[in-house]
Image (cartoon, helix red, strand yellow):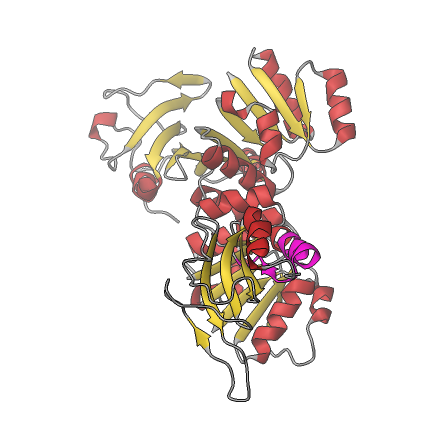
Amino acid sequence: MYIIVAGAGKVGHFLAQRLLEDKHTVVVIEKNRDVCQKLSQTLNLVIVNGDACEPRFLEEAHIERADVLAAVTGEDEDNLVICQLAKEKFGIRRTVGRVNDPANEHTFNELGVDVPIDATKIIAKIIEEEVSFTDFVNLMSFKRGKLAIVRVDLNDDSPAVHKNLNELVLPPDSVLVSIIRKDEVVVPKGNTTLEPGDDIIALTLVENEQQLLRALIGDLR
Amino acid sequence: MYVVIVGCGRVGAQVATLLSDEGHNVVVVDKNPDAFKRLGSSFNGLTIVGNGFELDVLKQSGIERADAFCSLTNGDNTNIMASQVAKKIFKVKRVIARVYDSARAHIYETLGLEVISGTVLFAAMIRDKLLDKRLSSFLIETGDLGIIELDVDEKTAGKSVSDITLPNEFLVCTIVKRCDQHGRDIIMPLPDTHVEKGDRVYGIVRVGSIDKVKKMFGADQA
């Protein structure tokens, strides 16, 4: 794929490197000359020295050939504008925008960034999951926040334990993806019986999340 | 009107003071509390410290009941983002963004945002002042049309409007008859209306045809 990366800070640099390793064609646009120079010494790719918010530099990066654009600068307003220009002016089908301030994620969704990536929130989630004593963690949301992957830990008083999956009443558009039982991964089938201590990974519509939790954990505390 | 203004630089403060003096309810948002010092002592609106595209800050500014919104910081992308938030998320009716970069201004204009580009506007205005004192090309946003003011002397006196119309180049819109003690007479002419010596003519002209039009009206049209 032909991928344009706007912004060559730590994230942009690392991303470009990963994409190159995966044999993609990568063009980086970065406005700071020194950063460009440093990047050119470590990675073998095309670098455009300019502000990706200005259409002429996107053209210089041959955006008309690009399949995907990722805007990963440290400024949310810049990332938004870069994604919008790519999409609206140059017809790029898939735009990925880094969200620096979690408060802006909703705005990115509303204003047409295909995939807003909120690193702060993702890291916080992972840490939360690692330190958490709660029975439920939202691992990831996608499709503009409509779908979520959640992890639910079953304990002894869960209404779902000792039941077969086909006895469980789950809300519509919710599906159990896998069951982690001790160190094993169990693929859920109709005759799988849930046990206390099982960790369930489920995919659900966010609007049905509460119903799903009620079915698996019981009434929420 | 209830107006929210983002950015309290020179332009933002000027607009805020202007509207406040006219009796409108004005809220100004700026990241830097010192910026509010620019507001004159007559300003009696509200000030809020915060980032002008953040939803919470905007809610605090009362954007949900605002009639109009403008983002006037010196950051193009900040203004573009803030005004889209105002327009698309909070559904404010009148939204204006200030955008310096003419390329970006043009693109967002075609995407339906109301954009004012100081750069384009001032460049046109300064061009007019330098080259054609009596032309206002900045009024018409395309930049290649202008409104020109011309005096009728012997060369055109007695001609009809259709005689001095150049299709696709120059169109007479208004004739101001000679002023006297009774005031002046303003005419929206028809093709067979005649112009007389001493009349002043206002017309729309293509910038590329200015010299041709001036020549038609006589050399002395500085």
Q: Is residue A76 visible?
A: no
Give how far across and how far down residue B143 sits, in percent: 55, 50
| Quadrant of the snapshot with the C terminus of chain B | bottom right
Out of B153 and A140, give the one closest to the viewer. B153
Q: Is residue A180 visible?
A: yes
Q: Eyeballing the image, is B88 above or below A135?
A: below
Q: Eyeballing the image, is A75 above or below A168?
A: below
- At 62% from the left edge and 30% from the top edge, which residue is drawn? A57
A180 vs A2, left or right, is left
B31 vs A219, left or right, is right
To which quarter of the image does residue A15 belong? top right
Q: Eyeballing the image, is B186 above or below A107?
A: below
Out of B92 and A155, give the one closest to the viewer. B92
Q: Specify whether residue B128 is painted magenta.
A: yes
Q: Number of marks in the image? A: 0
To which quarter of the image does residue B194 belong? bottom left
- At 41% from the left edge and 40% from the top edge, which residue is drawn? A145
- At 56% from the left edge and 69% from the top edge, which residue is drawn? B27
Q: Eyeballing the image, is B127 above or below A61?
A: below
Give how far across and how far down residue A172 sits, in percent: 24, 36
Outermost bottom residue: B181
A33 vs A182, left or right, is right
Give the residues in magenta. B122-139
Give how far across and how far down residue B84 sits, in percent: 48, 51
Q: Specify whether residue B28 is painted magenta.
A: no
Outermost left residue: A167
